[in-house]
Amino acid sequence: MGEVTKEIMGESSDFFAIKPMDYRRFLVISPGTGSQKVQRKHDASEAAKWGVLGWLSSKGGSPLVNAFMQASADMVDFRLSAVFRALHLEANYLRIQDDTLSGEVASVDIATKKNLNGLVKTGEALLKKPVSRVDLETGLFEASKPETNEEALRRFAKLFSNERKLRHARSPHGHNSTNLKRC
């Protein structure tokens, strides 16, 4: 979104008369990488006793790195969810995320054929699940619509296709433009 805003502010010909913060014109699909099922791994009294090494390595993981990685993704989703919700534009933002992964499919560094096939199956099952949104009070994902992720992606694809056709029709470069940005 930041890159698109820069293009708009730079008056790129690919963005016709769009104001930089006019979120009504934005359609955002945010595919997540998945995360482990939310479970308490550590408690405050235990963490209070850790030194530097405890924060870097505890119970076979790295609590500090895990916290930063998860917080970064969560902050982006939380901010976008809050902005689109506040502007009553929730239908323009789609986050597809599975926060219930467990076992090997929850690992980012196991590239075996078995695990990759497991990820494909997880992704296919995720398409059949209802669209979920982050609850701004709890931070947890909750089903928000009867629409499935697959149906939402089809809806977005149609919107993107219509927008692309409209931009081609309005472009000073005509239908042969190769400079049309995909956003």
Image (cartoon, rainbow, N blue to C red):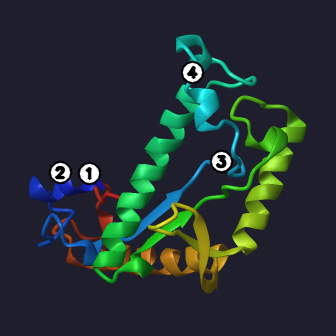
Q: Which residue matches tag 1?
A: 2
Residue 24 badge: none
Indicate which disc, 4 or 3, sits on the residue closer to the N terminus.
Answer: 3
Q: Assign a secondary structure to mark 2.
A: helix
The amino acid on which the numbered mark 4 sits, given as a three-letter code, is Trp
Q: Is residue 121 left or right of residue 90?
A: right
C-alpha distance separating marks 3 and 2: 31 Å
Indicate which disc, 3 or 1, sits on the residue closer to the N terminus.
Answer: 1
The amino acid on which the numbered mark 3 sits, given as a three-letter code, is Ser
The amino acid on which the numbered mark 1 sits, given as a three-letter code, is Gly
Q: Is residue 41 visible?
A: yes
The amino acid on which the numbered mark 2 sits, given as a three-letter code, is Lys
Q: Is residue 173 above or below residue 58?
A: below
Q: Residue furthest bottom?
A: 146
Give the label, 4 or 3, closer to the camera: 4
Q: Is residue 158 left or right of residue 154?
A: left
Residue in view at x 50 percent, y 69 percent: 135
Q: Is residue 183 visible?
A: no
Residue in view at x 41 percent, y 78 percent: 90
Give the label, 3 or 2, closer to the camera: 3
Q: Is residue 93 left or right of residue 63?
A: left
Q: Residue furthest front?
A: 45
Marks 2 and 1 in Cβ contact (< 8 Å): yes
Q: Tag 1: Cα neighbours inside 10 Å, few (<14), some, or many (≥20)?
A: few
| Residue 101 image point, x, y percent | 75, 50
Q: Which residue matches tag 3?
A: 35
Q: Which residue matches tag 4?
A: 55
Residue 6 badge: 2
